[in-house]
Amino acid sequence: MNTQTALEDIKVGLKLKLAALWAALMFLYIYVDYFHFYMPGQVSAILTGKVYTFTITQNFLLVTLSSMTVPALMIYLSVALPAKVNRLANIIIAALYIPYSLFNLAGEAWIHMFLGAGTEVILLCLVIRYAWYWPRIPVGKT
């Protein structure tokens, strides 16, 4: 007896898709920064207290961590927030992080940084698109 089967296409909810996009974005942020250490002179500059043109201070590290905390929290918030707030937060935060991702190309940018920034922008555009076209249901009058 020959039985044919097909792969089940499991539908993933929008909130989970958004969370996955934010998680992918965070991995890219981490890896682009990690690979940056392999560029000549970067580790020695860090050891002397410089990143790009910025002096490494407590305030610099606080601002840097704060800027990465928002997309990290969006992984959870995309699943936990109610739809109306969720949609708005994803659209606004993703739109604000597009120029942030492109800022990493300022100064000496190697090809891996262009690939990372380009992919980050695509992921953020997908977040905006998914949130913008959030499915709607009819609301009955009471």
Image (tube, rainbow, N blue to C red):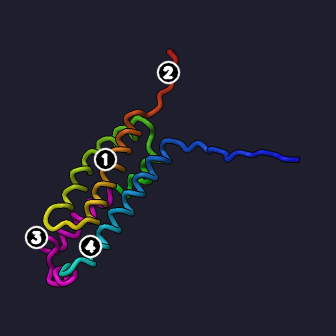
Task: Choose the circle earlier in sequence order: 1 or 2.
Answer: 1
Task: Choose the circle earlier in sequence order: 1 or 4.
Answer: 4
Q: State how far apart marks 2 and 3 are (Cα).
A: 53 Å
Quadrant assignment, res 63: bottom left
The correct choice, above or below, for 35 with respect to 47 in the image is above
Q: Is 14 placed left or right of 11 in the picture? A: left
The 10 Å Cα crowd at callout 4, few under 14, some 14 to 19, many 20 or more, is: some
Task: Choose the circle earlier in sequence order: 4 or 3.
Answer: 4
- Kindly identify which residue carries mark 1: 94
In this rendering, the label closer to the viewer, 1 or 4: 4
Q: Could you tell me which secondary element the residue under label 1 belongs to?
A: helix
Q: Could you tell me which secondary element the residue under label 3 belongs to?
A: loop
The 10 Å Cα crowd at callout 1, few under 14, some 14 to 19, many 20 or more, is: many
User: Which residue is outermost to the top?
Assistant: 141
Q: State how far apart marks 1 and 2 are (Cα).
A: 28 Å
Q: Which residues are magenta?
A: 43-70
**Residue visible at 17% across and 73% down?**
51
Task: Choose the circle earlier in sequence order: 3 or 1.
Answer: 3
**Residue visible at 42% across and 51% down?**
21
- Kindly identify which residue carries mark 4: 36
Measured as percent of width and height from the top left, residue 94 is found at 31, 47
Disc number placed over residue 139 in the picture, else none: 2
Q: Is 4 placed left or right of 95 in the picture? A: right
Amino acid found under the numbered disc labelled 1: Ala
Measured as percent of width and height from the top left, residue 109 is found at 19, 66
* 72 or 13, nearer to the observer: 13
- Kindly identify which residue carries mark 3: 53
The 10 Å Cα crowd at callout 3, few under 14, some 14 to 19, many 20 or more, is: few
Q: Could you tell me which secondary element the residue under label 4 belongs to?
A: helix
- Secondary structure mostly seen in magenta is helix
In this rendering, the label closer to the viewer, 2 or 3: 3
Amino acid found under the numbered disc labelled 3: Thr
